[in-house]
Amino acid sequence: MQFKLPKTPAVSVKGKDFKLADVDPNDITPFKHKPDDKDEAGPRLLELRKRLNDLQELLYAEHKRSLLIVLQAMDTGGKDGAIENLLTGVNPAGVQVSSFKAPTSEELKHDFLWRIHAQTPKQGHIGVFNRSHYEDVLITRVHGLIDEKTCKQHYHDINNFEQLLLNNGTRILKFFLHISKKEQAERLQARLDDPAKNWKFDPNDLKERAYWDDYQAAYEAAMTHCSSGDAPWFVVPANNKWARDLAITEIVVAALEDMDPQPPKPDFDVKAQVIE
Amino acid sequence: MQFKLPKTPAVSVKGKDFKLADVDPNDITPFKHKPDDKDEAGPRLLELRKRLNDLQELLYAEHKRSLLIVLQAMDTGGKDGAIENLLTGVNPAGVQVSSFKAPTSEELKHDFLWRIHAQTPKQGHIGVFNRSHYEDVLITRVHGLIDEKTCKQHYHDINNFEQLLLNNGTRILKFFLHISKKEQAERLQARLDDPAKNWKFDPNDLKERAYWDDYQAAYEAAMTHCSSGDAPWFVVPANNKWARDLAITEIVVAALEDMDPQPPKPDFDVKAQVIE
């Protein structure tokens, strides 16, 4: 690990024997609040947001390195909410959020990393991926669109691709928002029950839900094959939204603190400037 | 005008005899606060932000139309601050901020709208331009890089281009953040006086400042040639940051209210869905 991890319920994926089932989606330790005590997280979150805002400005001022944040989850896992929460108070001019849906016919004419590469954050910026290149070892694998050999090749390609970004000064943090199958049922039901949320419901989500265990296995395999000290995967217990958001923000701030971006020294004589 | 304008200090540009000098950069009427009473703007701003957040979600849900917000200003005019303020509380996944700097050599191989077109907001999204295609009738005109005839042609091209976007369901709002020359001097000096702000200072800004009057004339010409009811220019008095931010947010919310985005009706039988 390249930086000292803050204490959160999130688990960093290390070693080939990592099991997703060992992580409790309801876990909120060591946060010192009760599950329904979400306002208690408020003061710390406000403190972190202020620090994040400052660090982002420094990253932008330095204009040498960048940060890539990848978010993956099962349907209703909370990617949109987590992104909205994380970026509250962050200057939108220094952030780019990219959502990867089913590839277009044009995108399918290229290798699977082509459309991803085009969206990587430029110097001084924070890039957030809502879904990512990992879909190509998840949905494709679950539905048998790629065989085992191709999947292994994809893991290898992903690791090499992330190494290229790392070599160029991009720090990478990858988060899997970990909800329980029961929690997903409740969130889907809420989308059906509230007419204002109907548009968020897609009957296809139910078909995908039937493959729950296969997805969990595919995530486990992808994370164990593609997690390194420089580009770690974090499994974030995400049944409690406040704990999910606090954990992610803690880790992002800690990573930026570790990067310690510095604004450039002026290349002109500050005292000689006269404003007329 | 396609929508009822809220009462703000901003002036919408109408008619060929519009004069920038007639707009006072310090104006805060009809806001009912004193210039230094910035916290008074707070409650209304919070109310507007909540409404903006709701309207953006509806625009996203509808997924048919989009909103393009163009920001232009003299150096230190407050584009970055205004964007950060406007987008506070807006879901970043539905917004794209594009900053247009000096064109790259690749961009210069195309017409001046090529790089702009590539950044226009897609359906359901809000796009924010920090500088824009208008630079091609401002800096180029002030420095004599284009002649009068080319400039006129550019106005024409811009109007046709914006009409294309309008035809496709993109609402366009254009804001000129109007500061005084004295205010610019103070803001530039602040960047020199505070070492933490030195990186924001560019000695070239002083060279451009010498062309202040030429820029004001170029803005006046561009705005009178390229302001229409469907794609209006607003001159926003911007010496007081809180009044600037409140005015912009009022207008953006009013435009979205007028668009009145509607989430799509479910194309499946909601009651027939069973979550197992």
Image (cartoon, coloured by chain):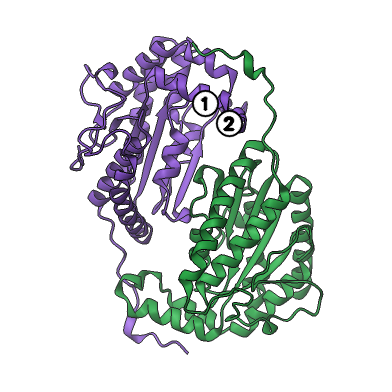
Chain colours: A green, B purple
Amino acid type, mark 2: Lys
The picture quadrant where one finds residue A179 is: bottom right
Q: Residue shown at 54%/29% (left/top)?
A: B101
B86 shown above or below B16: below
* Kind of residue sitting beneath label 1: Ala
Q: Secondary structure at mark 1?
A: helix
The foreground one among B252 and B268 is B252
- Is any atom of residue A50 visible in this view? yes
Residue sitting at the far bottom: B276
Marks 2/1: CA distance?
8 Å
Counting other residues with Cα less than 10 Å from the Cα at mark 2, is it few (<14), some (14-19), or many (20 or more)? Answer: some
Ranked by sequence position, the earlier of labels 2 and 1 is 1
Q: Residue at x 47, y 25 (%)?
A: B187
Query: In the picture provided, is B121 more to the left or to the right than A48?
Result: left
User: Considering depth in this image, is B67 or B152 the residue closer to the camera?
Assistant: B67
Query: Residue B92, image x and y in percent?
Result: 47, 53
Q: Chain of mark 2?
A: B
- Tell me if residue B202 comes above or below residue B71 in the rendering: above
Is A156 left, or right, of B256 in this rendering?
right
Mark number for residue A258? none
Check disc 1 and report the residue beneath it: B190
The residue where tag 2 is placed is B197
Tell me if B227 is positioned left or right of A232 in this view: left
Answer whether labels 2 and 1 touch (C-beta < 8 Å). yes
Q: Which quarter shows the N terminus of chain B?
A: top left
